[in-house]
Amino acid sequence: MSVNSVNNESQNTSLGKVLQFEMMTQIFKEAFEDSDSFQLVMESLTKALSDSNGNIDLSKLNLGQEDLSKLGYGAGQRLNTVYNSVQSDIQSGSSSIDQAIANASRKYGVDANLIKAVIKQESDFNPNSTSSAGAEGLMQLMPGTASELGVTDPYNVDQNVDGGTKYLKEMLNMYGNCKELALAAYNAGSGTLQSRGVSSVSGISKLPYETRDYVQKVMQYYGK
């Protein structure tokens, strides 16, 4: 094979990767109804394709023609690919956090990926995180709530994840295992849902924007 042939093949491969990336971008844009969802997916995709210097490396994009056909416009199956990309964002990178999540998941019967999604939104896996409102640790427990849950050190990974998961389980039980309502209550408090007459997923629209945005983002991270 000549040098020119090699160069031409390389250029064609690169062009194909660019076209694939552009096609995926368009598909994702049309797949989501709001810009926040689209932005979240694109941030995750860009992160997955970036090299150590932060530059996008399209060689990591390994979609064949058959794969691209499965991502046809309007095809609901493409969401599985989207969510696989988003799921990469809910990896803690810490064995101690992962173990705490696994322990709490088994203890309370809560999906580990849901716990991870909550932690991602609450603290981005920073055990020392403290909000302006005073919420503390990985699952951002308020001091009063932490005390009620038996958490004596909210910055202790095991205690915080155990307490936060216990509280999340209580919310899931309260709302018939409806994740959206449980998450809304985790964020805004069950009293807020009651006072605003929120008893179904459609009723979440009555809640403040912060809570609506919270539920949406956690469910996107959860990817189910």
Image (cartoon, rainbow, N blue to C red):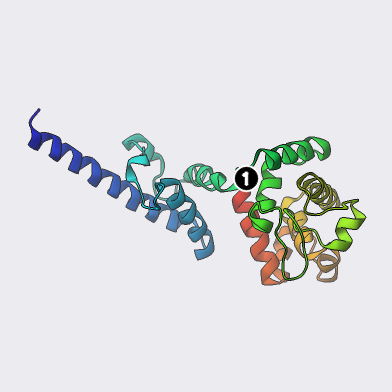
Residue 209: % across, % down: 67, 71
Please tell me which residue lies in front, 82 or 200: 82
Q: Residue at x 85, y 62 (%)?
A: 143
Q: Residue at x 67, y 62 (%)?
A: 214
**55 relative to 125 in the view: left or right:** left
Please tell me which residue lies in front, 47 or 84: 47
According to the image, label 1 marks what residue?
Answer: 92
Which quadrant of the rendered structure holds the C terminus?
Answer: top right
Q: Quadrant of residue 189?
A: bottom right
Please tell me which residue lies in front, 202 or 135: 135
Q: Residue at x 79, y 40 (%)?
A: 104
**79 relative to 107 in the view: left or right:** left
Q: Quadrant of residue 102?
A: top right
**134 relative to 95 in the view: left or right:** right
Under circle 1, the secondary element is loop
Q: Residue at x 75, y 62 (%)?
A: 187
Residue 150: % across, % down: 91, 51
Number of numbered discs overlaid on the protein picture: 1
